[in-house]
Image (cartoon, rainbow, N blue to C red):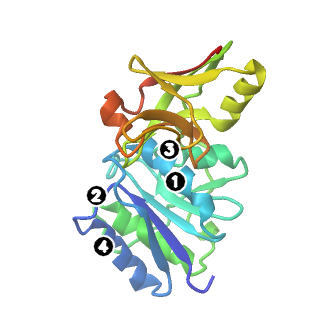
Amino acid sequence: MDQPIIAILTDFGDQDFFTASMKGVIAGINPHARPIDITNKVPPFDIAAASFILKASYKYFPSGTIFLVVVDPGVGTSRRIIIAQSQGYTFIAPDNGVLSWVMEEDEEIVVREAASEHYFLQEISRTFEGRDKMAPVAAWLSKGIQVENFGPVIDDYHTMEAARPEREGNKIWGRIIYQDGFGNLITNISEKEYLELTREVGEGSFAISLQEKEIPVRESYESVEKGQLLSLVNGQGYIEIAKRQGSAADDTKSKPGDPVLLTVKRE
């Protein structure tokens, strides 16, 4: 790749110097690299949200993209920095479980500890390893330095256990796993699980129950009037609770972690 892409995902926000400092380090090592922000507005310290955002976006980048993920509440501690390499992508992140969704989808992924100080900045801060360690590693990888040079393969890296929906007859119990900027609430009930239920149950009306509200499952946002709640399969392949031209999170007073129940009612 003539202009290797380094995709950046952080909780730094856009008002400070943090992301710009990392991009400056990258440019100093490899001016031909092309940084692209996935987002810098992950909720602060929210490893689970960052993991989902990465899962929802990484496959749409071209093969060879390097992902620099800095959501790091354990910065300055003994936690490691890791490099995870799949068939088409490379991920640099703190060893705190933020790559869990990616690792779950790719069982062939190889994980290394980024341990070679040769590829870090000379002066290391205990509070900004994204700039001093992770950004340089991403830049050197983008210049073609082989991943084997950065450190040994490890198998004791951290992962987060994903919350799984549970099927009970004609019901699926799930949870909200992510809230986007529109106030849409994404659940862990996948399109596959929803379609399996519809095939087995047959005719009926499907609804999500949340905070004592029953929200119908529809095909699109336009299926309801402005200001009404609905559920639908979203672009990431999960059941989402939305409010047409409004915030479902505000309307239902709900947040990630809250339980939901998908049910079918006979007409």
Q: Are marks 3 and 4 in contact (CB under 8 Å)?
A: no
Q: Secondary structure at mark 2?
A: loop
The residue pinned by badge 4 equals 21
Q: Are marks 3 and 2 in contact (CB under 8 Å)?
A: no
Q: Secondary structure at mark 4?
A: helix
Separation of disc 3 and disc 2 at Cα? 46 Å
**Foreground label between 1 and 3:** 3
Separation of disc 1 and disc 2 at Cα? 25 Å
The residue pinned by badge 1 equals 54
Q: Secondary structure at mark 1?
A: helix
The residue nearer to you, when weighing 190 against 231, is 231
Q: Measured along the vertical axis of the image, is residue 53 above or below residue 60? A: above
Q: Measured along the vertical axis of the image, is residue 260 above or below residue 221? A: above
| Residue 10 spot, x, y in % from top left | 38, 58
Residue at 47%, 56% (x, y): give it: 93
| Residue 197 spot, x, y in % from top left | 71, 24
Quadrant of the snapshot with the N terminus: bottom right
- First along the sequence among labels 1 and 2: 1
**Foreground label between 4 and 1:** 1
